[in-house]
Image (spheres, helix red, strand yellow):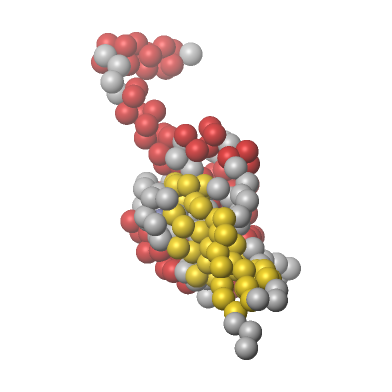
Amino acid sequence: METFSLIIIRSAVRGLAGYDIKKLMRNQYFPPTFEVEQFHCIHCGVFARQEWYETLEYSTRSMMQTGIKMTICSHCDKKCFWFEGRMVVPAESPVEPAHPDLPDACLQDYTEAKNIFSQSPRAAAALLRLCIQKLMPHLGEKGDNINDDIKSLVAKGLPALVQKALDFCRVVGNNAVHPGEINLNDTPEVAQNLFRMINFIVEDKITRPQEIESLYNQLPESSRKAISKRDTNT
Ligand SMILES: [Zn+2]
């Protein structure tokens, strides 16, 4: 009788070539990606080297690829399994964690969206739309109507990139609650990008101004007064 066994061999990976090192240094999130050598581990959350293995079905007569690949994280030693380019175990979808400066009022929606993402990218997008709406008062807007709020922010000189990120969330979020042209459950990566966009908005509109303000306040009071005087005179 023919016996079958499963063997596991090391497989080739893509190196760091695809990474923007500057982004890495800015602590950006690199989601687990098929055949990529290093990414943020879904188990331990650390950006770590991943060993890739191929599984083969082996008998006395033949040897076949199963199509299943495995990664082992060099930091926590935990495994993930991949099939047809997608991570299947654990089933959680790799989604960017919330920006540490995301206001508490928005955090619950973000976390719920993250938890539900693998079952329904569409439901996640609807929650993220709500998250954006709750973020608006923290950007000095009313938070009743996203479209009006974006318009008002543009009038106040909102940087074009942040405006595009907000409009991306608005349009994708609308598609989640009203029938639209984007089927989010068929194109989960569109909904996945919403998480990244929200973090980008928080970084640009909340974190950076806070950092600059705090640096500015370290200047001697006399210098700050002189600057204030200069700017009121012009
Ligand atoms: Zn790990």
Picture quadrant of residue 157: top right
Left or right of 216 on screen, residue 134: right
Q: Nearer the viewer, residue 164 or 72?
A: 72
How far across and how far down the image is residue 189, in percent? 62, 61
Q: What residue sits 47% from the left and 36% below the top?
A: 26
Q: What residue sits 55% from the left and 64% below the top?
A: 8
How far across and how far down the image is residue 184, in percent? 64, 69
Q: Which image quadrant shows ligand 1?
A: bottom left
Left or right of 2 on screen, residue 93: left
Can you say whether 82 is above or below 194 in the image?
A: below
Q: Nearer the viewer, residue 200 or 160?
A: 200
Q: Nearer the viewer, residue 147 or 25?
A: 25
Q: Which of 185 and 71 is in front in this view?
A: 71
Q: Residue furthest left?
A: 221
Is residue 230 something one can see in this rendering?
yes
Q: What residue sits 73% from the left and 68% below the top?
A: 181
Is residue 155 something one can see in this rendering?
no
How far across and how far down the image is residue 36, in percent? 58, 50
Can you say whether 219 is above or below 142 in the image?
A: above
